[in-house]
Image (tube, coloured by chain):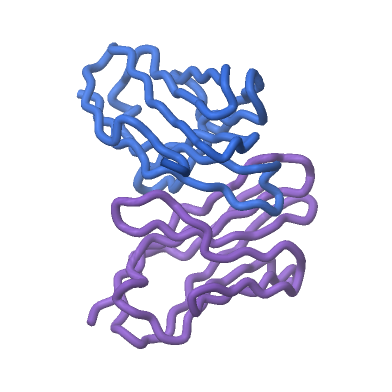
Amino acid sequence: DAGITQSPRYKITETGRQVTLMCHQTWSHSYMFWYRQDLGHGLRLIYYSAAADITDKGEVPDGYVVSRSKTENFPLTLESATRSQTSVYFCASSPRAVLDYEQYFGPGTRLTVT
Amino acid sequence: GNSVTQMEGPVTLSEEAFLTINCTYTATGYPSLFWYVQYPGEGLQLLLKATKADDKGSNKGFEATYRKETTSFHLEKGSVQVSDSAVYFCALSDRGGSEKLVFGKGTKLTVNP
C-alpha cells in the first residue's frame, strides 16, 4: 500500500521490556520523524532523520533509539520501557527540509507501559 | 527558542457557527506557518499553510492569515459543520535552517448538530 504505515497500531508492554515501533513509507521521502503525543503537551519531536544513516535528536530523545538503514524505514526502539513512555507515537515523512513542505503522518501507535 | 501558543480548548460550537482558533508564535528568522488537523483515531494532516507575511492560507472553508506585526496565524471558518470536529494544531518551521516543525498543544473542537 502506498503511503506511510505504522505497526503495531496498539501495544501493551511491561516496564523494563524492549519494544520497537515500526514506520514504513513508500514515497522515498528523505526526511522522517518520530513524535509522541500526550495530553497537555501536543506533539513533541523525539528523533528525526534527514536521510539513510543520518539521525538527530529532537526535543525528548531520552530512553529512545532510532536507526535508518533504508530510506523507507525508520524504527523507534524503547530500550527499557517506562510508564512515562505510555503515549501515542506518530511517525511522519517529508520530501525535503520541512520549511515549506508538509509532513505526512502515519496513523499512530498507541503504546501502554504497565 | 521557537514556540507556538494556541488558545486553550476544548471549543464547543453549534453547527453553522463561526470559528476562530487563536495562534501566536515566537520565532527567529522568517518561519513558515501551518495548521494541521487530527480527526478522531487518525494521524495529523495538513489543513493549510502560509510561507510569508500577509499570505493567506485556505482549504475546506478554513482560512488563516500570516500576520508578522502581531506574530499571529489565527484559524477561522465562517460556518462549521459536525464533520469539522477534530483537534487543530498550529505549527511553525524556521527558515533559519531547522528541518523541524514546532507544534502548539492543540485545540479540540466539537461541533454539535
The colour chain A appears in is blue
Compared across the picture, whether B48 is left or right of A12 comes to right
Q: Nearer the viewer, residue A15 or B45?
A: B45
User: Does residue A53 sit above or below A1 in this rendering?
Assistant: above
Q: Nearer the viewer, residue A40 or A43?
A: A43
Q: Quadrant of residue A10?
A: top left
Residue B109: percent from left, percent from top: 35, 68
Residue A43: percent from left, percent from top: 46, 44
**Which residue corresponds to the image point at 42% horizontal and 37% vertical from the top-left?**
A36
Residue A57: percent from left, percent from top: 59, 26
User: Does residue B43 sit above or below B19 in this rendering?
Assistant: above
The colour chain B appears in is purple
**Which residue corresponds to the image point at 23% horizontal and 82% vertical from the top-left?**
B113
Considering every residue shown, the one lying at the far front of the view is A1
Residue A92: percent from left, percent from top: 51, 40
**Which residue corresponds to the image point at 70% horizontal and 57% vertical from the top-left?**
B32
**Which residue corresponds to the image point at 63% horizontal and 54% vertical from the top-left?**
B92
Compared across the picture, whether B33 is left or right of A12 comes to right
